[in-house]
Amino acid sequence: MAADVDRQLWESTNGSLSIEPVCSDRADSPAPGLVSGTEPGAGQETAMFAHTESFEDLTADTEGAGLEPQEREASLQEGRGEDEEEPREECAVIGRQQQEGGREGGVRDKDKDEDVTSDAWRAHRKHVFVLSEAGKPIYSRYGSEEALSSTMGVMMALVSFVQSGDNTIRSIQGDGYRVVFLRRSPLVLVGVSRGSQSAGQLLRELQYVYLGIVSLLSATQLQRVFAHRQSYDLRRLLSGSEHLTGSLLRLLERDPGPLLSAVACLPLPGPARDRVSACLRQARAPPLTFSLLLAGTRLVSLVRRRDLHLHHLDLHLLANMAASCSAFREAEGWTPVCLPKLNAAGFFHAHVSFPLPGTPLCLLLLSTEREAFFELSACKQRFLELLHKRNALLGLQEALSCPTYSVALVGVPELRHFVYKSRSSGLYTSPELEGPYSSDEEQERLMCLYQQLHSRLHHPTRPLSSIYHTTHTHNLYAKVTSGFELYLCFSALGTKAIAEAAVSKLLKWIRKEEDRLFILNPLTY
Amino acid sequence: MTAMRVDAKVVMLGKESVGKTSLVERYVHHRFLVGPYQNTIGAAFVAKPTHVGDKVITLGIWDTAGSERYEAMSRIYYRGARAAIVCYDLTDSSSFQRARFWVKELQNCEEHCKIYLCGTKTDLIEADRAARQVDYHDVQDFADEIGAQHFETSSKTGNNVDELFQKVAEDYNSSSFEVMPGEMSFIQKMKNLRLPHVALRLH
Ligand SMILES: Nc1nc2c(ncn2[C@@H]2O[C@H](COP(=O)(O)OP(=O)(O)OP(=O)(O)O)[C@@H](O)[C@H]2O)c(=O)[nH]1
Ligand SMILES: [Mg+2]
C-alpha cells in the first residue's frame, strides 16, 4: 500500500512520465552493448563487495534477528493497519507531550536540549525514534529521550495494538507527514518525515539506524540484554553513540551510496591507486581480515582476505564511525565493531588512524583478534614507510586535495549532476554538487528526486528500465541495465532527446576516466 | 617516521565525559579543544616520551571510553599497566562512585598497577565554589587507604596536568628496577614486534 501511495504522488506531479516496462529478469534483456561485467567501472577480477544489487527488500529480515515466522508473514501484507489510524491525531500527540526532566550528566549537544513542546521541534523535517518493545525510549534525533518517553509509549501502543490483530503496522500517511515503523525485535524504530520521501526510503534509513546500533552492540548482545530483562534501559549501553546515529542520518540524506547500495571512490589515477593498494597489501599481518583506506566516505583502496567480502552497508557504517571520531585523529583508535551484514553475532576489532595529518585520509585495519593492536599498529607504520619508499605519497596527497570533479568535464552543457553505478563492482561515481546544489537543503532535495526515481526503477512488481521526469526546475532521466544504473539531472532547458544523447556521451566519458574514478584492480592479501 | 617504543603502559579510566581525553590531549598536545564533546569510541592509544632526570621514558597511554558498552573490553587496556589514572569530575558526585568501581577492579585484577586518582575540571570549581560535589579531603582519605596518589587538574587551564603525568613517569622510573612478571611480558611483547624474524614471517 505504501508503494501505491508513492505512485499516486509520483504521477500527480509528473506530466511527462515515460515508462518503458521491462521483464524483471534483466539478464535476458541487456542494454545495447553493455552486459554486466563489461560496463565502465567494472572491476577486472571478482567483485569487491558482498552484494551489489541496488534494491534490497527491506521488509525481508535478512539478519534473521528475532522476527517470528508469523510476524514475518504479517509484515508481507503491506500494512493492513494503515487505514485504521488517524495520522493527524498521531502527529498532534507527538507535539503535545510535556518535558519530564533533563538528562543526568549535563553536557549534551544542542539537539538534545531542544524543547519537545516547541514549534521548532515539530518543524524538523525528519524525526527518528528508537524504542524497546517494552516502550522504553532509546533514541530520539531531536530532544531528550526522557522528555519523549510518553510519546514513545504511544508509538509502542500503536504498534502493539495493530499487532494484536495479527497485522504489522508499516506506515501512516498524514497531511504532509509520513510515519513509518520498522520492527526489529527487540527494537522498534519510528521515522516521521515531512518531506516527499517515500516510505521505502524512510524504511531504509530506519534499517541503517538499526544496523548502526547492531554495529555497536552486535545482535547477540542486543538479544541477550532484553532476554534477560525486557524493561532494560538500552541507553546505558548506547550512551555516547548519539552523535554516530546523528551523523549516519545526515549521511543517508546526502550521500547516494546507501540508496544505490554502492560505494564511491576517491578519484585517483589508476597507476597511483595500484601503488597505494600494493603498499597496503604488502603491509599486511596475519590477523588482518580487511585493510581499508578511506577519505571521508570515499574509498581509496580496499584489500581483503580472499574468502571474505565486505558488504557496502558495513562499509558505510565503518566510514561513519571513523569520520565521527575526531578523537582518533592524533592517536590510534582500537575499538570493537560488529559488521552486521558480515556477521551480526560477533565483533571485529578495528585499528583506526589518520596517517596523513591535515588530510581526511583514514586507515582502518580490521581483525578478529582483540589483542592485535600492536601488530596492526606496526602494519600502519609499515604502510607509511612503503608509501614513502615507493613514491606513492605525492599522488595520494594530490588526490586528497581535490576529492571531487566538476560535471562540466563531461561536456554536456545542460547536465547539472549525475550518479553512475557500475553494478558488477558495486562502485559509483558522482560529480561535485555545485552551483544551485551547494546548499544542504538543495542537496537533500536532489537526493529526494533520485530516491523517487530509484523507487520507480526498482518497483517490486513493475520495475522500469528507464524513466524521464520533468519538474519546473529540473529534467531528470534514470536508466538501468544489467551493467549499470544511471541518474542524470538536467537544467530546465533539458529535453528527453538531450538526455538520451547525454547518456551515451557520459558513458564514453566515464569509460575514458574509469581507471581514475573506480577501483579496477581490487586486491586480496 | 620513528617506530614506537613504549616503556610504561598507562591507562585512563573513569566515567563518560569526566575529561580523560581532554587530559591526554592537554598533556600530549598542550591544547584544550572546545566545541561539541565527542565521546571516545573504544579506546585510543598514544605514545608520549618524557624526561625523567637524564633519561627518556615513553609512556604508552590508553585513553579508554567511559561508556559501559566497552566495559567487557576494559581488561585488555589495563592488563599489564604500570599506572592507572582514575578520573572523576569534581562537579559530578556520581563520577566518583564510578571511580571507586575502577579502583576495586584494579585492586582485584592488577595488583602491580599504581593508582592515581584525578579530580578533573578544577577551573569550574574556581569559577564557582558551589559547583564542587566531591570533597578534597574525602578523596585524600580514600587515596591514603588504598595507597594511591591524588591530583586535581584542569585540562582547560592546564593546571596540574604535566605534574600528574610527570609523577607517573618518575614513579615508573624509580620502581623499574623491580621485576614484575606481568610487566615483563608486556614489554617483551612490544619488543618482539620489532624483531626482524617477526617481520619476515609476515611476508
Ligand atoms: N571546563 C572544563 N571542561 C572540561 C575539562 N576537561 C574536559 N572538559 C569537558 O568535558 C567534556 C568531556 O570531555 P572528554 O575529555 O571528552 O571526556 P572523556 O572522559 O574522554 O569521555 P568519554 O570518552 O566519553 O569517556 C568535554 O565537553 C570537555 O570539553 C576541564 O578541565 N575543564
Ligand atoms: Mg574520551
Image (tube, rainbow, N blue to C red):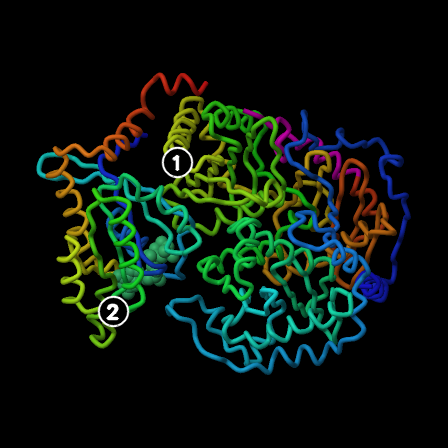
Position of residue A357 measured from the top left corner of the image (x, y, whole percent): 39, 41
Q: Position of residue A71 (x, y in %)?
A: 74, 58
Q: Label 1 amino acid? A: Phe
Q: A82 or A509, which lies in front?
A: A82
Chain designation of label 1: A
Q: Which mark is residue B124?
A: 2
A510 within the magenta span: yes
Beta carbon at label 2 within 8 Å of ligand 1: yes
Classify B184 as above or below A224.
above
| Point 73% across, 37% down: residue | A423
Magenta stretch in the rendered image: A504-525
Given residues A122 and B114, the one toward you in this image is: B114
- The part of the image, by quadrant, that contains residue B19 is bottom left
Query: Is the residue marked by circle 1 packed among few (<14), some (14-19), or many (20+) residues within 10 Å?
Result: many
Quarter of the image for residue A512 reads top right
For label 2, count other residues whose C-alpha is less than 10 Å away and answer few (under 14), some (14-19) or many (20+).
Answer: some
Residue A145 sits above or below residue B78 on the image: below
Q: Secondary structure at mark 2?
A: helix
A80 vs B144, nearest the viewer = B144
